Image (tube, grey):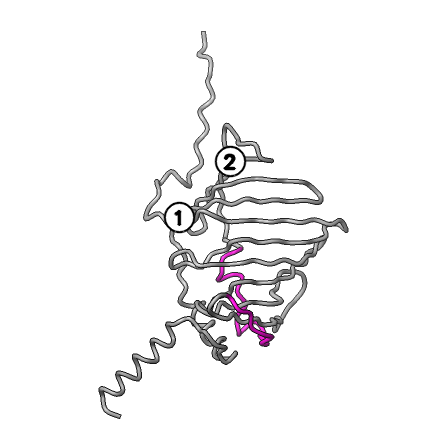
Amino acid sequence: MTARALLAAIAAALLIGAAPATSELDSQYVLQRYALALVDTPVPKLLVFSYTVSQAGLGNIEQRHELYRSGLSVRDETLAVDGVTLHRKAVRFEQREDRYAIDRIAPRGDAYQMIFLHTVRDGSHVDYVYDTTPILRQGPGMWVEQVTIDGVKFLPKRVRFHSEGDNAKGKGTIEYAAFGKYWLPVVATVDATVNGKPARERIAWSDYRFPPSLPSSTFLAPQPLPLASIPPI
């Protein structure tokens, strides 16, 4: 093969890899693309978004929040409760990991057995559904039972999971989508039993923003004012 023909073949292969899949791909090839996509997907350095959380069962809650994140640093502002906008928003400062981040939730080949089940069509492409079983699971926790891999981005579009704790257990799903170059959660639902009673939770994320910078005060809790003292007479 001449150098010119070799370059043409490489270019054609790249174009095929970049184009949306209009027909079904080999399931093992999809898993290879999936593993590479998980490694290559960036994590936002700074992230701002809105989210709503609804809970029913042991307690009924409806809240709307705005959250700022930089690494583990979180500023979580509660804007409305039960449909009523708060005149003075409640602000919570924390250090915590993002438990819904794709690099924490997505099942990986070194930790799960992944068995191809079937495809589902989504517009002009197909997605790939796999049954997932943890290779090693000890005691309570959370594990993924099924993943739907997007046939264009080769990232988890829908994750079905099981969660089990000392006094609670449940099943749920998390759906993801592309926001710019990032792959972020859209909606999560959980049906559970807590202390033997049914409970349900739904979280919906929206209005994702990726600012180049944030004021240094964003993640600093305000210091309390010093107590006033009466000078001696």
- Residue 139: within the magenta? no
Q: How many marks?
A: 2
Q: Earlier in the sequence, mark 2 or mark 1?
A: 2
Q: Secondary structure at mark 1?
A: strand
Task: From this view, report whether residue 115 is shown above or below residue 232.
Answer: below
- Packing grade of label 1 (10 A; few <14, some 14-19, many >=20) is some
Residue labelled with disc 2: 79
Q: Residue at x 58, y 74 (%)?
A: 118
Residue type marked 1: Arg
User: Residue at the front extreme?
Assistant: 124
Q: Position of residue 80 (x, y in %)?
A: 54, 35
User: Residue at the bottom extreme?
Assistant: 1
- Residue 119: within the magenta? yes
Give the extent of the magenta segment: 100-122
Q: Nearer the viewer, residue 171 or 22?
A: 22
Q: Are marks 2 and 1 in contact (CB under 8 Å)?
A: no
Q: Quadrant of the C terminus?
A: top left
Q: Residue at x 32, y 80 (%)?
A: 12
Q: Nearer the viewer, residue 197 or 98?
A: 197
Q: Which mark is residue 55?
A: none
Q: Nearer the viewer, residue 184 or 6?
A: 6
Q: Which mark is residue 209?
A: 1
Q: Residue at x 46, y 18 (%)?
A: 228
Residue type marked 2: Leu
